[in-house]
Image: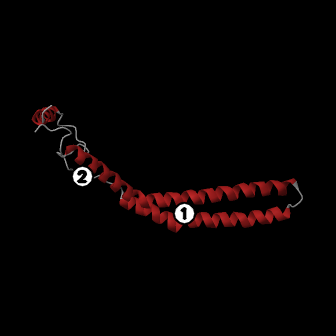
Amino acid sequence: MAWDEWEQIKAAVAARQDNHTQLNSAGGTPGGPDLKTNDQGKQKAIKALVEAIRPGLDKAGTHADEDTDAAERTFTGWATGSGLKDAHDEWALQVKGLQQRLAHDQAALSKTKKGFQFVEHGVESALSRINSPGPGPHRDV
């Protein structure tokens, strides 16, 4: 197939495409608004995790540990003491798991904007490679 013929086919396909379909915007004009995230909301969530939620969990976990330790000592040798120890061990596992989850969520919120920008840049780059005219695989000279 001659290069000119290929260009004519591409032009014919482009002319038939639905003008309402936009790959680079949310229904607006081409090159319209970029992908947005709620930066202010993410910052508030991170601040709440750092200043209130994670410290509150640490405080609640420590308080429960102290009270449960005292009750375990009081009921040593009784089935109640053994049950309290089992419950206390499970509590410690749950608190540790929640602390790890909150730390992970905080890190994920911090990385979200960068991730969105990376994805958007990758899509834009891939689309530009599709649309840019380059040397064809076979050129009749």
Identify which residue, 120 or 11, lies in the foreground: 11
Determine whether, in the image, residue 72 is placed left or right of residue 110.
right
Q: Which residue does the numbered mark 1 point to in the structure image?
A: 53
Give the label, 2 or 1, closer to the camera.
2
User: For the residue marked with disc 2, what is the amino acid?
Assistant: Pro
User: Residue at position x 21%, y 50% from top?
Assistant: 32
The quarter holding residue 118 reads bottom left
| Quarter location, residue 130 | top left
**Residue 24 shows in this picture:** no
For the point 77% across and 65% down, the residue is 69
According to the image, label 2 marks what residue?
Answer: 33
In the rendered structure, the answer to whether residue 106 lies left or right of residue 12 reads right
Give the quadrant of residue 2. top left
Q: Secondary structure at mark 2?
A: loop
Q: Amino acid at mark 1?
A: Ile
Decide if residue 75 is in sight here.
yes
- Residue 92 percent coordinates (x, y): 69, 59
- Please provide percent x and percent y for residue 107: 48, 61
- Alpha carbon distance from label 2 to label 1: 35 Å
Using the image as rendered, state which of residue 102 and residue 72 is in the foreground.
Answer: 102
